[in-house]
């Protein structure tokens, strides 16, 4: 088992939001025993207090790790988003602290695609309304506004991991698939890419959103886009609540212009399962409302636990930043019999030569050196003979522009 400069039992992992126990298992197997798990998200002062002494923090979509919260995290080395979205983390502020962020870009994608397809079928048959009526003693036996999925056109906005899987599943039911994406994507099966969003909206029986939360996707579906949907269309959003303006959507449902909708994510979501969910969509029987559970299946959560915990362990034990969402990516071999120095610095002229000068002055042989930079950050990993790092570490910390230095043995 590799060794870190700080005894592993002193390295604190704080896992929030009911992260699956598979994560704890991975950490413990790697020798990280100081793991605190909490079932819910934290916010404000409570979050700041808890993360003050954490070296690694794991969270899901509810914990807002903004610049203020990050400033309180004195010892933070890396953050694991045990989900896909990283919009809840101030990635820039984390970078400026030399804190690497990792996520699980694939593990829950199938769960979302399956849910959306199921919702499309239920909405095409008017099941949410019929179900709600039956619970109140009603009996809505009728074929009016009830349709098969076969032959219908599904429009997918955002043809990434989820959108493209949904495309394949929908075609297997005999649906036609159109998609809109800002990037030219290889269409799977018979799916076709459409050149602009409005064209797609007007051609589809069902429209489903699968874009990330970005400045460019914020409120991308507003009154104009909802008016561009075909009369009688179905609208599904399991991406992010900030992508769709809820008021015009609610109006289109109330007026009967849309057949139904399914919404899993909202502009404002309850902070915990104890808080009240408020939305203009409440009380509309032909709207399926789900509490941001698109990716919440046992399979997805167990896999995410493994995936992200393994990335954190790899970063802690070996220095690898492969798949980090905010750090230059460096793939590293193991380093048996050598010390490994991890140096995160501002990418400004002179830092690398100052680092190399430290080794040259100390007459220490550099056995291997790995460097990646981006516009603002440099990450260099230097392997030396065993025991050689001790004499240079303070000098490396003193190099102007240095943000963080760690040593592995
Ligand atoms: N409801 C849930 O529980 C749940 C679960 C997982 C993911 N999500 C959300 O779903 C999003 C998508 O997940 P993914 O794995 O498919 O992501 P992805 O990154 O694989 O795909 C996103 C796609 O959207 C495209 N895109 C970006 N901006 C666009 C724009 N303005 N218009 C059209 N297309 C645009 C990208 O080019 C990409 O192809 C995630 O970012 C996350 O926010 C929600
Ligand atoms: O980004 C994601 O993967 C989803 O929104 C799921 O988030 P969650 O882990 O909070 O369910």
Image: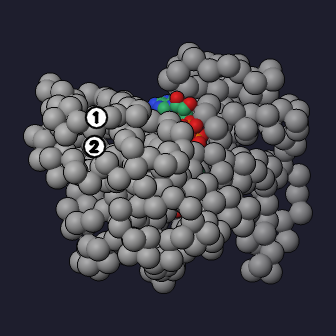
Secondary structure of the residue carrying tag 1 is: strand
Residue occupying the far front of the picture: 363
> What residue is disc 1 on?
378
Q: Please state if 400 lies on the left or on the right of 139 as rendered.
A: left
Q: Residue at x 19, y 40 (%)?
A: 362
Q: Earlier in the sequence, mark 2 or mark 1?
A: 2
State the image quarter where residue 233 is shown: top right
Disc 2/disc 1 C-alpha distance (Å):
6 Å
Q: Is residue 234 visible?
A: yes
Q: 361 or 251: which is nearer to us?
A: 361
Total numbered labels placed on residues in the image: 2
For the point 87% across and 43% down, the residue is: 148
Q: Which mark is residue 369?
A: none
Q: Residues within 10 Å of mark 1 (few under 14, many from 20)?
A: many
Tags 2 and 1 in contact by the CB under 8 Å rule?
yes
Is 291 placed above or below 379 here?
Answer: below
What label sits on residue 344 in the rendered view?
A: 2
Q: Quadrant of ligand 2?
A: bottom right
* Image coordinates for residue 365, horizontal then vertical, percent: 32, 34
Residue depicted at 81% across the width and 23% down the height = 189
In the picture, measured across the screen, residue 257 lies left or right of residue 4, that is right
């Amino acid at each position: 088992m590799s060794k870190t400069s700080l005894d592993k039992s002193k390295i604190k992992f704080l896992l929030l939001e009911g992260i699956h126990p598979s994560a704890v298992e991975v950490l413990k197997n790697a020798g990280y025993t100081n793991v605190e798990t909490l079932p819910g998200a934290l916010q404000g002062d409570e979050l700041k207090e808890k993360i003050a002494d954490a070296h690694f923090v794991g969270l899901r979509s509810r914990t807002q790790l903004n610049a203020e919260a990050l400033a309180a995290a004195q010892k933070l080395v890396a953050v694991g988003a045990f989900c896909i979205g990283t919009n809840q983390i101030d990635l820039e502020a984390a970078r400026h602290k030399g804190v690497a962020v990792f996520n699980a870009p694939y593990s829950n994608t199938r769960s979302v695609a399956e849910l959306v397809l199921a919702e499309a079928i239920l909405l095409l048959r008017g099941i949410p309304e019929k179900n709600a009526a039956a619970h109140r003693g009603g009996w809505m036996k009728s074929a009016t506004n009830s349709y098969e999925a076969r032959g219908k056109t599904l429009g997918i906005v955002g043809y990434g991991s989820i959108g493209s899987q949904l495309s394949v599943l929908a075609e297997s039911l005999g649906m036609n698939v159109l998609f809109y994406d800002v990037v030219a994507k290889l269409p799977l099966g018979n799916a076709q890419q459409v050149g602009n969003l409005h064209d797609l909206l007007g051609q589809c029986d069902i429209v489903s959103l699968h874009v990330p939360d970005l400045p460019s996707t914020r409120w991308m579906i507003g009154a104009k886009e909802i008016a561009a949907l075909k009369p009688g269309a179905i609208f599904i959003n399991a991406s992010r609540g900030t992508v769709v303006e809820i008021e015009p959507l609610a109006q289109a449902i109330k007026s009967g212009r849309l057949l139904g909708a399914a919404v899993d994510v909202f502009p404002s979501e309850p902070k915990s399962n104890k808080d009240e969910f408020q939305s203009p969509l409440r009380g509309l029987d032909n709207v399926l409302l789900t509490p941001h559970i698109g990716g919440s299946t046992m399979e997805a959560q167990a896999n995410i636990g493994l995936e992200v915990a393994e990335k954190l362990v790899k970063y802690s034990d070996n220095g690898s930043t492969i798949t980090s969402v905010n750090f230059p990516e460096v793939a590293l071999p193991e380093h048996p019999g050598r010390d490994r120095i991890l140096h995160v610095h501002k990418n400004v002229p002179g830092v690398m030569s100052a680092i190399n000068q430290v080794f040259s002055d100390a007459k220490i042989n550099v056995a291997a050196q790995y460097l990646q930079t981006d516009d603002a950050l440099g990450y260099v990993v230097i392997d030396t003979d065993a025991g050689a790092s001790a004499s240079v570490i303070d000098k490396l910390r003193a190099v102007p522009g240095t943000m963080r230095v760690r040593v592995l043995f």
